């Protein structure tokens, strides 16, 4: 035996590598890197969400408008015709002398604006660059917010990743029931936009006769009660506080043992809240969540300390989810469902079982066939084949690749194709033996003759797999990965590995009586 | 064991016109099918919703149909899926509302039809469907371009054109079969088509490699004969590999379950057509394209000469004798 040839050593090492690193995946041990199963195999929920990024732009425009109004009120600058369009704010400064003050504010405190003036008329437009930035920021913020919410929801390994400019991929393995799935979807989609708004007590009794546009004339809006749509409130359009000033929210229970949510404000929120409640004793404060009024209690005294509560007939589970959403912050823009794939755990298990049956039976067929057709050369090819599978599993586990159903099909296919290189080589060797070449020379030349064809064929397939990876999504990507790893592994095992075995066994082959039988040739 | 005696050379090229004719017919039939019957695009490409439901007993298809009657889902199709217990409900629309989607509603609607488990809900919105379709075509097109470039570089442009024609032949016929048997075209079918592409290319390249080798070493100057010899020599390998792959895919087809059925079927067709084309068709294109042995030899000699000169120059530089 001539074991110490470099090919055999590399092959032996790759066998050890393959077996060692595939043990965690095959045995499902607790330690070590394992192949993760795709959602189609283990069950779970996969969603592609689209962020309505224009909403973030609108919100930014609104906040610019309200800070201009705040500034003008504060500095007693008279402005008129303040209005907002898609990506611009327009207004008129009534007194020419006040214009320098306004200009300075616009230049110093608001960024990303293009200011155009026409006499006393101001047109503020968001620059294209700033619009892009706002959209981009909104998407990352949505990703962050959803991730926070899911982390607190108590699911194992939720994954939230951005895809492209406006899309987000959410993967929730381990969702078992339709109810869980629904709850998770609701949690993700909840805007969780909390606002504390002042009720316009002067006109409150006219709320049932007023139209929305009439309300707008007084700077008010009409909101419905969350439990009873016929109860309406007239509140001031510009909120006193919003959810961005919340630092904590927890579920608690009131005297009637009904779940309520206690929230805590940050210091600036607490100050504003304290000031407002001090000067509004006797008036009502509407607690508004996502545009619905949850409660509108009377303010009895100044509320210091910066905490408040939302009550409004929640169930305990609902209150818990609302609290999570409040803690994680509001979504800066709403999301819509673009694609959803949910697989029940039993279906995933069935899929694994079916593809295992296919894999094993296909494998056994190929195995037997190779031995019958090529005799001992067939056994050697089969060793390479088995090693090939171990290497695929090991490499996938090392890179933390995900095994999907098409990926399984990819492995099955690789088994079929991996014998190809062995077949090409064995055929070449047979050919040379028939021409009367000696065995060592036939092996050497057989490999070098076969090499060019195997390389060209595998490289082209690999190129196709790379393109598939670049342009595929989800499961297709998984398929491309397994095929690529399979091709590389088969080049290692078939070209290098079997060659190494032949070299190691050469002395033995030469000693045997019927040398050609090794290759199934008479 | 041996299937083919190596010294036997089959005269494929003298029969190339009948085979090309047969292929031509198949390709035309496939194209006609694709334009008249068309492809049955599944939700991955067309958008829509699929709900897979497994009942504890035989699925009450009539009852489900009656239940959905009068709701907005009355146009959905209900078919058995794999076993009598399981059904798949295909709904045209999709809902972009996260909090309340079609799956939830179906769950509620079907409540009265018996004990069941919703095993799968797939929803693909129209925008995503369009994107997936676009990307799929893009992947297919790009693959062909890359193959064209690589084969031109490694062989010669006629080899590249011939292999692309052979690929187009295989893919068209596979698509024709998909259309004929009304297989639902989803992402996995696209994966199968792309695999066929890689597989059939594999086969073709190995035959072409033999032809390239034959052209270089044999004294034969008639292309037909070189091709016959090369194809005959690779015949054993081509059929063997196809057989082993066929084994694997047929087990996938038989035991892989309903969900992988379309994939396995497409692969089966692809393997059969791919094997046929790399034996009978691919090399014929080479002959039809008037590949010239003399020119190729001259070019290869030129290449060799240039390389030798380069080596000579390098050797001279290294010895410092320039």
Image: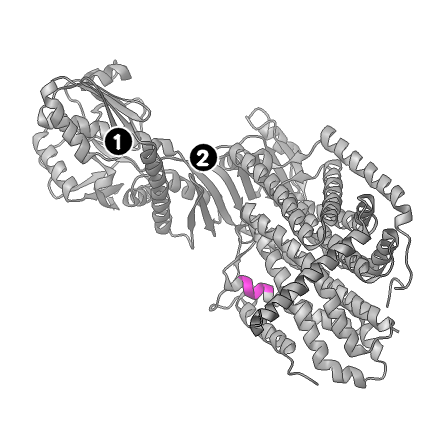
User: In this rendering, is residue A154 above or below A374?
Assistant: above
Q: Are marks 2 and 1 in contact (CB under 8 Å)?
A: no
Pointer 2 residue: B100
* Badge number at residue A462: none
Number of other residues with Cα within 10 Å of mark 1, as a class: few under 14, some 14 to 19, many 20 or more: some
User: In this rendering, is residue A202 above or below B58?
Assistant: above
Residue B210 is drawn in which quadrant? bottom right
Using residue A252 as the reference point, say whether residue B115 is left or right of it. Answer: right
Q: Residue A276: image x %, image y %?
A: 11, 33
Pointer 1 residue: A113
Residue B193 is drawn in which quadrant? top right
Disc 2: which chain?
Answer: B
Q: How many marks?
A: 2
Using residue A305 as the reference point, say whether residue A455 is left or right of it. Answer: right
* Front position in the image: A453 or A338: A453
Residue at point 63%, 67% (across, down)? B311
Q: Within the magenta stretch, is there residue A395?
A: yes
Number of other residues with Cα within 10 Å of mark 2, as a class: few under 14, some 14 to 19, many 20 or more: few
Q: Within the magenta stretch, is there residue B11?
A: no
**Residue A240 showing in the rendered view:** no
Magenta highlight range: A392-396
């Amino acid at each position: 035996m001539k074991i110490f040839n470099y090919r055999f050593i590399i092959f032996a090492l790759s066998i050890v590598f393959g077996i060692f690193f595939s043990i965690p995946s095959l045995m499902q041990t607790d330690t070590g890197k394992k192949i993760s199963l795709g959602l189609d195999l283990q069950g779970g929920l996969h969603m592609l969400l689209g962020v309505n990024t224009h909403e973030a732009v609108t919100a930014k425009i609104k906040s610019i408008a309200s800070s201009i109004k705040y500034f003008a009120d504060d500095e007693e600058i008279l402005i008129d015709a303040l209005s907002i369009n898609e990506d611009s704010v327009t207004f008129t400064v009534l007194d020419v002398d006040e214009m320098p003050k306004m200009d300075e504010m616009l230049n110093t405190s608001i960024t990303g604006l293009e200011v155009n003036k026409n006499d006393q008329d101001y047109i503020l437009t968001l620059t294209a660059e700033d619009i892009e930035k706002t959209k981009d920021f909104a998407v990352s913020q949505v990703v962050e917010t959803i991730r926070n919410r899911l982390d607190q929801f108590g699911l194992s390994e939720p994954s939230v990743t951005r895809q492209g400019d406006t899309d987000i991929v959410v993967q929730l393995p381990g969702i078992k029931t339709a109810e869980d799935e629904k709850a998770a979807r609701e949690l993700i989609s909840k805007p969780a936009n909390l606002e504390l708004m002042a009720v316009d007590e002067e006109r409150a009794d006219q709320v049932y006769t007023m139209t929305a546009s009439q309300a707008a004339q007084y700077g008010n809006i009409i909101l419905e009660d969350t439990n009873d749509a016929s109860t309406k409130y007239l509140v001031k359009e510009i909120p006193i506080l919003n959810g961005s000033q919340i630092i904590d929210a927890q579920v608690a229970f009131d005297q009637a043992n009904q779940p309520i949510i206690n929230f805590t404000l940050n210091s600036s929120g607490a100050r504003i809240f304290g000031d407002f409640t001090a000067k509004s004793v006797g008036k009502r404060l509407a607690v508004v969540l996502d545009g619905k009024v949850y409660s509108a209690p009377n303010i009895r005294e100044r509320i210091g300390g910066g905490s408040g509560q939302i009550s409004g007939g929640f169930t305990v589970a609902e209150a818990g989810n609302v609290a999570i959403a409040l803690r994680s912050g509001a979504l800066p823009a709403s999301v819509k469902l673009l694609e959803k794939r949910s697989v029940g755990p039993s279906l995933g298990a069935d899929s694994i079982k079916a593809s295992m049956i296919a894999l094993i039976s296909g494998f056994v067929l190929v195995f037997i066939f190779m031995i019958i057709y090529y005799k001992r050369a067939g056994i050697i090819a089969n060793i390479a084949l088995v090693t090939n599978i171990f290497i695929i599993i090991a490499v996938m586990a090392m890179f933390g690749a995900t095994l999907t159903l098409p990926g399984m099909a990819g492995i099955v296919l690789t088994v079929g194709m991996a014998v190809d290189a062995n077949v090409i080589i064995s055929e070449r060797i047979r050919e040379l033996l028939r021409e009367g070449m000696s065995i060592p020379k036939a092996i050497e030349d057989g490999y070098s003759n076969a090499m060019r064809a195997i390389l060209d064929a595998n490289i082209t397939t690999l190129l196709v797999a790379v393109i598939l990876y670049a342009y595929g999504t989800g499961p297709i990507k998984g398929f491309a990965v397994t095929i690529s790893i399979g091709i590389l592994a088969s080049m290692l095992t078939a070209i290098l590995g079997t060659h190494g075995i032949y070299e190691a066994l050469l002395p033995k082959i030469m000693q045997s009586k019927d040398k050609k039988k090794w290759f199934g040739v008479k | 064991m041996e299937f083919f005696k190596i010294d036997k050379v089959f005269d494929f090229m003298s029969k190339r016109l009948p085979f090309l004719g047969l292929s031509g017919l198949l390709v035309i039939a496939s194209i006609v099918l694709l334009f008249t019957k068309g492809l049955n695009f599944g939700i991955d490409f067309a958008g829509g919703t699929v709900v897979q439901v497994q009942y504890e007993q035989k699925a009450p298809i009539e009852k489900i149909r009656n239940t959905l009657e009068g709701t907005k889902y009355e146009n959905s199709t209900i078919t058995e899926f794999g076993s009598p217990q399981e059904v798949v409900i295909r709904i045209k629309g999709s809902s972009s509302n996260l909090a309340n989607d079609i799956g939830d509603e179906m769950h509620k609607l079907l409540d009265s039809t018996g004990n069941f488990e919703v095993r799968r809900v797939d929803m693909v919105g129209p925008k995503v469907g369009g994107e997936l379709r676009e990307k799929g075509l893009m992947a297919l097109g790009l693959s062909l371009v890359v193959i064209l470039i690589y084969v031109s570089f490694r062989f010669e442009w006629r080899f590249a054109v011939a292999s692309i024609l052979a690929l187009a032949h295989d893919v068209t016929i596979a698509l024709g079969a998909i259309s004929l048997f009304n297989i639902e075209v989803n992402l996995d079918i696209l994966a199968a088509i792309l695999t066929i592409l890689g597989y059939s290319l594999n086969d073709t390249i190995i035959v072409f490699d033999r032809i390239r080798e034959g052209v270089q070493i044999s004294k034969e100057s008639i292309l037909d004969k070189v091709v016959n010899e090369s194809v005959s020599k690779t015949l054993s390998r081509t059929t063997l590999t196809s057989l082993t792959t066929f084994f694997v895919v047929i087990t996938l087809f038989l035991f892989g379950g309903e969900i992988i059925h379309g994939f396995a079927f497409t692969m089966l067709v692809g393997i059969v057509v791919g094997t046929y084309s790399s034996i009978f068709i691919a090399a014929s294109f080479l002959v039809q394209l008037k590949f010239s042995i003399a020119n190729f030899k001259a070019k290869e000699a030129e290449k060799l000469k240039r390389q030798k000169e380069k080596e000579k120059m390098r050797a001279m530089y290294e010895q410092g004798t320039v």
